[in-house]
Amino acid sequence: MSSFYDDPRLQSLDPKKLRFLDQMSSEMKQKNQDEVLPFLLAVTAAANERGISFTDEEAGIIIDHIYPNQTPEDKKRIEQLKMMAKMFGG
């Protein structure tokens, strides 16, 4: 996973969001494939608690970083994550 700081599409992102993404990225490196979706749901809840939200465009860029080589199953899991995040106010 490349650094969120290096992505030119995120250069104008609020520094608070970038720090949050950097922390998430570090923690995510320790997760196996089966742990990623539950971890991302927990991260979404933590972001909401901190008053951090991401636009659909920002979320798409984040997903590009998390899943650079998306398989059809990855895409399905990502869509599930998006639906769950919206249910929880993300």
Image (cartoon, rainbow, N blue to C red):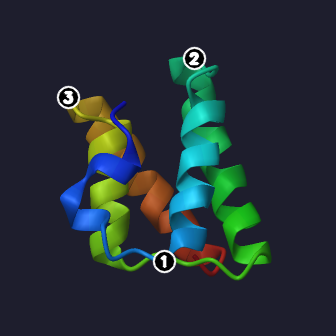
State which tag comes first along the sequence, 2 or 1: 1
| Residue type (three-letter) at the residue carrying disc 3 | Asn
| Local SS, label 2 | loop
State which tag comes first along the sequence, 1 or 3: 1
* Residue on which disc 2 sits: 32
Residue 12 percent coordinates (x, y): 33, 76
* Residue on which disc 3 sits: 69
Q: Is residue 7 left or right of residue 87?
A: left
Please tell me the numbered disc located at residue 14. Answer: 1
Camera-side mark, 1 or 3: 1
Measured along the vertical axis of the image, is residue 67 above or below residue 35? below
Measured along the vertical axis of the image, is residue 17 above or below residue 37? below
Q: Residue at x 57, y 17 (%)?
A: 32
Q: Residues within 10 Å of mark 2 (few under 14, many from 20)?
A: few
- Real-space CA distance between mark 1 and mark 3, rounded to the nearest whole angstrom: 27 Å
Circle 3/circle 2 CB separation < 8 Å: no
